Amino acid sequence: MTHTTTDQPTRRPSGATVPVLAFAGIVVAVMQTLLVPVIKDLPTLLSTEPSNATWVLTSTLLSGAVATPIMGRLGDLFGKRRMLIVSLAVMVVGALISALTSTLIPMIAGRTLQGFAMGAIPLGIGLMRDMLPREKLGSAMALMSSSIGVGGGLALPAAALVAQHANWHALFYGAAGLGVLSILLTLLVVPESPMRAEGTFDVLGAIGLSVGLVLFLLPITKGSDWGWTSATTLGLFAASAVVLVLWGVLELRLKAPLVDLRTTARPAVLFTNLASIMVGVSFYVVSLVLPQLLQLPKATGYGLGQSMVSAGLLVAPLGLTMMLTAPVYARLSAKYGPKITLILGMLIIAIGYGAGLGLMNAAWQSLVIAVVLGAGIGLAYSSLPALIIGAVPASETGAANGLNTLMRSIGTSVSSAVIGMVLANTAHHVGGVAIPTMHGFRVSFLIATGAVAVGLLMALFLPKANRAPQLRASSEEDANLERAEEALRGFRGRVLNADGDPVARAKVTLIDRRGRQAGATLSAEDGSYALAVPAEGAYVLAARATGHGPHASSATHAGDERPVEVDLALPGQSVPA
């Protein structure tokens, strides 16, 4: 049995907690999208070759991929709010370094530090799972998960406006300001989670995963520059395979690994992660194709002749629609489960890209594509954390969602490399300038549709969700009447204070691994409680009583008839519950 406890009382979450966490996600996305409007000008701005300038984007991608699972695990061990603030602080430092330089190496260093903020997404989802009541969790996680698209959608026109009318360094000062605001809001509004995983941080595992990921993502992002069949590209892929296999062997042997590969191999987690890669691919294709199509001059015969700012505004509904689908997702998921919402999201994405093949002739058509794809990607992204949380113990939420966010990042990396290669190979060269063709745009949309089809297949393989009825006691009398039956198959024990004395009328809540309330009761005069479990698996028992700090303990039930004994020790005097 694994216990997860807290030694100190924590503030209760307020109504502002979810918006503040979602704002942190939006800030991260803004940082990622920041340089999109000035990509083509980077070689001139940094006085370097185009092949070197791409490192400004690649470095952020690599550090984000590495930081995501590591920050998730550190959050599980040492506190998710603490690690969220660390992620944002590192991002602010990186943004200030980039704001103060116009040379390549310091810029790459600054952008690498900015990539660390990617850990904020899984940490925010983990905080929500630990603190929010079941009925609010679905829409909150959906909002946090889709914040990456919202921030990206909003940042494009804003960054374009700044880049067009001010010094490009202002972009980084703006990002640093948003980061500081996010840190202050988190400190003021977000309480620390009481959940802690046991064990130590797996340093060797973190180094192994970091090296393996860098070796894998480097040739993906730079393959078109180096040549896909060059010795460098193939050598790095081979080295990556060797390092990741050795890393996997090491993780399986450790008691407290960075990533629990046995959990990751469960069908519910494995197929969710594979589907996540495909959703990542489909999300990035539209972000790469539509702005270029909109900004190409009308003289090409297919370009739509929009300004940088207009193009950003026409693509912005992609992010806004993702945000608006969060409450819709919560209602659909509550009724049909996150597997169905993921499948529905994938189908809408496929319809969006399919329709997009014929809707490339006017600016308003780009707007329609952005709205349809935003709705589909929003539903798909919102489903992913719920599927992961439903399949892992509470103490592994941060690490598991970190790995899932990493899978999406790998999808966007692969998408960036493949679409970049397609557009480069199908481009017209006029006066030494490569101009993307309509054929290249259509092939890109076909690739996205194919990725969604594969993702849909993965989603169909997901096991059917356990839709056990919610068990809860409506009053102390009901609880006492049910206690004898519940003790047969579930958890029982006593609620005690810091001195070991029984605590009567303490509310004990049973939370399943989806973050949903699976039962509740009040402790008797002798401090005893009993709660039935709807199915075998990992649960969290949370106890709260007037005059005491809260306490959370995770425990696993094998599903047999024997009750599992779990005593819950409440910390000393605290704010009344």
Image: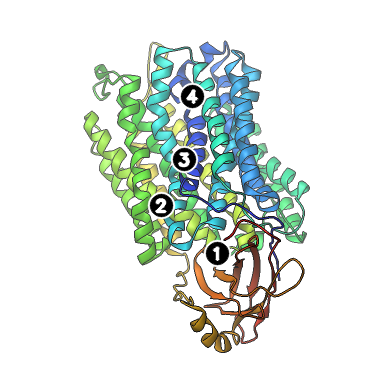
Q: Name the residue that disc number 1 marks.
A: 391
> Which image quarter holds the N terminus?
bottom right
Residue at 52 percent of width and 86 percent of height: 482
Whether the residues at callouts 3 and 2 have beta carbons within 8 Å, the answer is: no
Q: Compute the Cα span from label 1 to label 4.
A: 37 Å
Q: Compute the Cα span from label 4 to label 3.
A: 15 Å
Q: Is residue 329 above or below residue 440?
A: below
Q: Which mark is residue 380?
A: 2
Three-letter amino acid code at disc 4?
A: Leu
Give the mark nearer the N terminus: 1 vs 2: 2
Give the mark nearer the N terminus: 1 vs 4: 4
**Is 241 or 546 nearer to us in this picture?**
546
Residue at 41 percent of width and 54 percent of height: 139
Three-letter amino acid code at disc 1?
A: Ala
Residue 26 position in % (x across, y down): 47, 37
SS at badge 4: loop
Question: Callout 1: few (<14), some (14-19), or many (20+) C-alpha neighbours within 10 Å?
Answer: many
In the rendered view, does 184 fall on the left or right side of 301? right
Q: Is residue 190 above or below residue 179?
A: below
Q: Compute the Cα span from label 2 to label 4.
A: 26 Å
SS at badge 1: loop
Q: Compute the Cα span from label 3 to label 1.
A: 23 Å
Q: Name the residue that disc number 3 marks.
A: 148
Q: Compute the Cα span from label 3 to label 2.
A: 13 Å
Q: Compute the Cα span from label 1 to label 2.
A: 17 Å
In the rendered view, does 398 fall on the left or right side of 141? right
Residue 484 position in % (x across, y down): 58, 89
Q: Is residue 277 above or below residue 559?
A: above
Question: Which mark's residue is nearer the viewer, 3 or 2?
Answer: 3
Evaluate whether residue 219 shows in this view. no
Q: Name the residue that disc number 4 marks.
A: 35
Evaluate whether residue 79 shows in this view. yes
